[in-house]
Amino acid sequence: MRVAAHRPGVLLGPVLAALDRFLRTGTQVRRAIRGYALAGRFAARGNNFTFDPDGVYTCETIEVGQNVDLGYRPILMAAQSRIRIGDNVMFGPEVTIRGGNHRIDQVGLPMTAAEKEPGDESHDRGVTIGDDVWVGTRAVILHGVTIGRGAVIGAGAVVTRSVPPYAVAAGNPARVMRLRWPVETILTHERQVYPPDRRLAATELAGLAELPAGPRPAPVTKSLTADLQPR
């Protein structure tokens, strides 16, 4: 619906403004109630977890880590599989994650009647998103995909295959464009952010060496480092 922006009359203007405030207050109250009701239904959730109550979630199959923001009106659905999201993850608006799939291979049945066995991983694979991942606006991540730690998913991407750690992926279907940094910079970053038992394994780093790398980052001064600390 399109609304023409005519100037209201002297008396009508204050009335409309009051009505608008009343409706916005009602919306805020509804969203707060729905948010509290949904929060306790997630399979797991860490501290500082932010989500839009007007999104769509199969809460009982979704696990969320620390410092996660699911953005504006996402759709996270996994009826018989799991969606696992690590720490320090941020979504743009309207991201879709779809764990599981429909069967299209059964002859003599409409697709709406095709059944799957419980735990059938060929049709009901989940989605895993590692730590420190940024998923852009309206990206779509399909079942069976793992997004590696530190990866960036471009806006509007349709991710049908797993994305390596620290890779930038975009397009439909999404493909890896480059790494965020050269491998030696990734190793430095890992040492500064993660304890030894959580750093990428040597085999994982070796696999990244085959991918094109982004520019070397500028050095960070102490004052800038202090400014970037979470508050």
Image: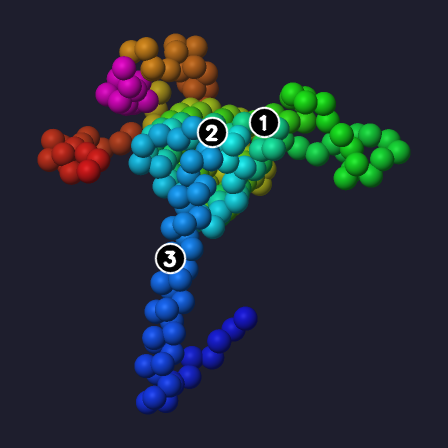
Callout 3 touching callout 2 (CB < 8 Å):
no
Across and down, in percent, residue 64 comes to 42, 31
- Dot 1 or dot 3: first in sequence order is 3
Please rate how many residues cluster around mark 2, counting C-alpha atoms within 10 Å: few if below 14, some from 14 to 19, many from 20: some
Q: Amino acid at mark 1?
A: Ser
Lateral position of residue 174 relative to residue 183, left or right: right
The residue to which callout 1 is attached is 81
Residue at coordinates 42% horizontally, 18% vertically from top-left?
209
Q: Is residue 17 above or below residue 203?
A: below
Residue at coordinates 46% horizontally, 33% vertically from top-left?
42
Q: Quadrant of the N terminus?
A: bottom right
What is the secondary structure assignment of the residue under circle 3? Answer: helix
Residue at coordinates 42% horizontally, 79% vertically from top-left?
5
Q: Which residues are magenta?
A: 185-195
Residue 187 in view: yes
- Dot 3 or dot 2: first in sequence order is 3
The residue to which callout 3 is attached is 28
Residue 38 found in image quarter = top left
Q: CA distance from mark 2 to mark 1?
A: 12 Å
Callout 2 touching callout 1 (CB < 8 Å):
no
Is 186 included in the stretch rendered in magenta? yes
Pick the residue in front: 113 or 104: 113
